[in-house]
Image (cartoon, rainbow, N blue to C red):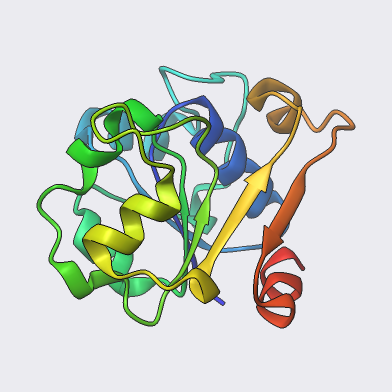
Amino acid sequence: MQFGIIGSGSWATALAKILTDNGNSIYWWIRNTETIKHLQTRKHNPHYLSAAYFDSKQLHMIADLQEVIAKCDVLIMAVPSAYVAEALQHLPQGIFQGKKVVSAIKGILPESNQLLHEYLAAKFAVDVQDYFTLLGPCHAEEVASEKLSYLTFSGVDAAATAAIAA
């Protein structure tokens, strides 16, 4: 299973850290090429959770969102809800076909007052069977620093939920 992360803020950085620390190779969409260069050379995100260091061999950082989506089976959305529509605005409707989409996004999309799954279903025809949520009372800093915390992962398809969570 190939994971991709969409977003480069604190929560995306924490999730990238946990996934790579657990031996997963990930594709990470980072819009800013300077941030990519910094991560490649200095092994940490210069803007968020800068104490979290990465094994860059596990990271494939790409500024082209469509390329990240094409390479991955599971896409973790970690863009702040206020920027989701902007981040996805140039994508073709069927781009998420055959992909599992995990929301790590808090809140509603302010332009439409929709939850992410409603927006993705309407704009990209993402089926509820392919949609999952990652929720928790924890903070990005706690996850990145490997402190004990609690997350809930859910989805309609129990088998797919268990496979992704593993």
Q: Residue at x 23, y 71 (%)?
A: 95
Is 125 located above or below residue 136 in the figure? below
Specify the quadrant that holds the N terminus. Answer: bottom right
Q: Residue at x 76, y 28 (%)?
A: 137
Q: Position of residue 119 (x, y in %)?
A: 32, 51
- Give the total of numbered labels: 0
Specify the quadrant that holds the C terminus. Answer: bottom right
Q: Is residue 67 visible?
A: yes
Q: Residue 142 lies in what quarter of the image?
A: top right
Is 150 located above or below residue 18 in the figure? above
Q: Position of residue 21 (x, y in %)?
A: 70, 50
Q: Residue at x 26, y 36 (%)?
A: 112
Horizontally, residue 108 falls left or right of residue 17, namely: left
Horizontally, residue 80 falls left or right of residue 11, namely: left
Q: Is residue 2 visible?
A: no
Horizontally, residue 17 falls left or right of residue 4, namely: right
For this orientation, the residue located farthest to the front is 113
Q: Position of residue 90 (x, y in %)?
A: 9, 52
Q: Position of residue 92 (x, y in %)?
A: 13, 66
For this orientation, the residue located farthest to the right is 148
Q: Nearer the viewer, residue 158 or 115?
A: 115
Is 95 located above or below residue 83 in the figure? below
Q: Residue at x 50, y 29 (%)?
A: 44
Q: Nearer the viewer, residue 116 or 143?
A: 116
Is 164 located above or below residue 45 in the figure? below
